Each structure stands twice: as structure tokens, then as C-alpha cells.
Amino acid sequence: MKKLALHWKILIGMLLGLIFGFIMLQVGGRAFTEDWIKPIGSIFVKLLKLIAIPLILASLIKGISDLKDISKFKNIGIRTIGIYIVTTVIAISIGLALVNIMQPGDGVSEETIAKLTETYSENSSVKAKIAEASKQKDSGPLQFLEDMVPDNAFSALSDNRLMLQVIFFAIFLGISLLLIGEKRAAPLKSFFDSLNDVVLKMVDLIMLTAPVAVFALLANVVVSSDDPDILFALLKYAGVVVLGLILMIVIYCIFVATFTKKNPLWFLKEISPAQLLAFSTSSSAATLPVTMERVEEHIGVDKEVSSFVLPVGATINMDGTSLYQAVAAVFIFQALGLDLTFSDQITIVLTALLASIGSAAVPGAGMVMLVIVLESVGLPPELLPIGLALIFAVDRPLDMCRTVVNVTGDATVSMMVAKSVGKLGEPKVKNWDDHYEEVK
């Protein structure tokens, strides 16, 4: 009997989680779910985050040291950043086009605005995002470059929020390994090769629990959801964001078919476990180990490319988030009865693009970036809490959706870059029990 594919197992787990969550919501089982179900999902996410930094370190150092030629790394780096910028601009443009055509903000009543403001404008999370954005905005133009360079490697390696610093250290170490010659580099290179294999095996083992974990994560999302009436009032806005995200997935499929000559449906099938985990966890960083495993083993992208493109993408490529910001910013202005000129909307494109790079390592980056975008087009400071309150109720489900697009974008770009440098080969799938006979 053929084994059920992983993505089907995860989908079944998600569906059961939604059903269980709705049942618990009806019978008042929120406390039970938070006490006994939520920890299972939290442990799963922690395990993924646990191996994210070791995987980036080992994979990136191995990938660079295998290049044998620094010019190859330069080619991969330039193409990666260039394609990421192009896809981000496309995402923002799609968002602006949809929100201007469909105008979801015009249908929001004053009563709804008042209710949302009362519910969320004093929310501690909203206030924290505004404070963080002010801090980001007040920093110098090159602050994000300064933040990329760690002053203590061990401190960077111990904090998942400092992913760009880990990437910088790994690249620096990998290039230095190349420059000392193959013979001298062999012992350290062998260590990182072995570490990479071990961490990928850990990914396989963690993924065995994925269906149960997504059940727990989705059940908790349902029981902790906000007032259904408020969610319904924001349905048109959420629908515009989701439509934009779906169109972005279509764009990725066109890129896959055009540039890599691969079947887009095959691509979506192979990357689907990473997409489903991105939806469940709302975190590109937590999903990174799974994205790397799917792209390398199931799609055929060489480690030399994936080890650089995917970690960088997880931190600076936020196509889904940038699209959401474009829609959210214009929606807020529409709902509050304020006008946005064409030049304001161009400012949104540029600010969202720069914010997606500069705010990459900030926790809850999407909302922080949105505050920066809103301030750049002149939303009065006293209206900022009201603006964020308008969209806060549906931010979590939309965060889940836009993370799927972020992860899909990373995988698409890794395929395009790999194809352009001749590093897109045949998939080589590994299973968790490949070497089990050796240790029985």
C-alpha cells in the first residue's frame, strides 16, 4: 500500500485542527485547548527554530566552500538580490492595483471604525509596533547595514532574530575557508559538511510530527480568534489581500514555467509541505529548515545556491508582506476618508521596498513596516493607532496567508537563480530512515 504523501497528512491535520477548534469554541473549551493542545504546536515551532541557525551556518559555509571560485558566489549574490527586488516591486504593484480598483475601505461604516478603535487602539501589541517603527524610522540610512555586522559571533548565533548577522558571519567564514586553500580548510569543512547532514536529518525527524503539530496550531488559532462580527466587517479588505496573494502565486508559477521550464503544478506539489507549515506557523524563519529540505531534495536546487538564496530570502524577501502593506495602507486611508495622490502611492512602493530590507530582522516585521509606510505618506500620528486598529483583528489570518507567499517566493527565486548558473538538477529525496539499518 502506497504511503500517504506528507502534504496530504499535513492538510488532514489542518482540517481536523480547524474542526476541533470550532467545536472547542462552541463548548467553551478555550482554556483546555490553550493548556493541553497549544503546547504541542509551540514545541514543534521551537524545534524548527532550534535548528534554523545551525542549518544556516552549516549549509551556507558548506555551499560557499564548495564553490572553489569566489566569482561564482558574486554571480549568485547579485542575481538573488536583483530578482528579490523585482518580485517585491511586482507584489506591491499588484496590491496597489487591486485596492484602488476594489476600494474595500469605502464600505466600512463609522460604527465599525468606532468599534475597532475602541477594541484595539489601546492594545499593547499595537503600541509596541508603533514604538518599534519609530525607532526604525529614526535610525540612519545605513543602520540596517550596521545591524548586519555582529560584534560577537556567539551572541548572534544565540538569537533567532539576528538571522542577517548569522548569514554575514557564515559568508565571511565560508569565503575565508576558500582563501586558505583546500588542504588547510579540509578539517573545518568536513565538520560543517557533517553538521549539515545531521541537521537535515533532524528536519526529517521533526517533520514526522508535522501533521499533529499543525492540528494543534490551527486549533489554537480558531479558539483565540476575535469577535466574528468584526471579522465579517473586514471581510472585503481581507478578500482583497488574499486575492493579491493568490495572483502573486500565479506570477511565481509563470516564472517557474518560463525561466526554469519546470511544471508549475509539480513545483507547488513539491513545495506544499513548506507552504502548509508557513501557513500554520506564520514564520518564514521557523519554516526555513523545511523550505531548504524541500528545495534541495525534492526540487533539485544545488546546495551552493539554496544555502545562500533561501536564508537571505527568509530575512529580506517579503513579497506577501509588502503586498499586504500596500493594500492595508490604502485601505486605512480610504476608511478614514483621506486622499492619497499618485505620488503618495509611488512613495508606498519605494518605502515598502526599502522597509522590507531594512526591517527584516524585526519581530512582527509586517506591522512595523506598515507603520513606516503609513508615516511616509503623511498619516497624522494621532491617527496611527486608529489605522492599525482597523486591520489588527484580521492580521493573524492574513499573516498566515502572506507567509505562504513569502516562502513560495523564496523557493521560486532559488530555482531561477539555480537555473541561471546551471545548478538546477534532478531531485534526490532522502528519508529519515535511510541509514536506519546501520544502527539497528
Image (cartoon, rainbow, N blue to C red):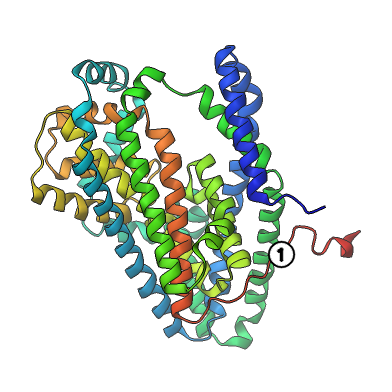
Q: Is residue 102 visible?
A: yes
**Residue at position x 58%, y 42% from top?**
45
Write down the quadrant of residue 314 in the picture: bottom left
User: Residue 21's spot in the image, x, y percent?
Assistant: 58, 24
Q: Residues within 10 Å of mark 1 (few under 14, many from 20)?
A: some
What's under tag 1, amino acid-wise?
A: Lys
Say if 337 sits above or below 8 in the image: above
Name the residue tied to disc 1: 430
* Left or right position of 420 against 346: right
Viewer-proximal residue, 143 or 52? Answer: 52
> Which quarter of the image is occupied by the C terminus?
bottom right
In the depicted view, which residue is nearer to us: 25 or 131? 25
Up the image or down, 275 lies above or below 34; here it is below
The picture places residue 16, in percent across and down from the top left corner, at 64, 31
Find numbered disc 1 in the image and state the secondary structure of the residue it sits on: loop
Residue at image point 32% right, 56% down:
357
Residue 282: percent from left, percent from top: 48, 42
Image coordinates of residue 110 in percent, x first then y, are 19, 18
Q: How many labels does the image show?
A: 1
Q: In the figure, is residue 345 to the left or right of 430?
A: left
Asked if residue 15 lies left or right of residue 198, the reply is left
Residue at image location 61% in from the left, 61% down from the top: 293
Residue lying furthest right: 440
- Is residue 53 something one can see in this rendering? no
In front of the other: 328 or 353: 328
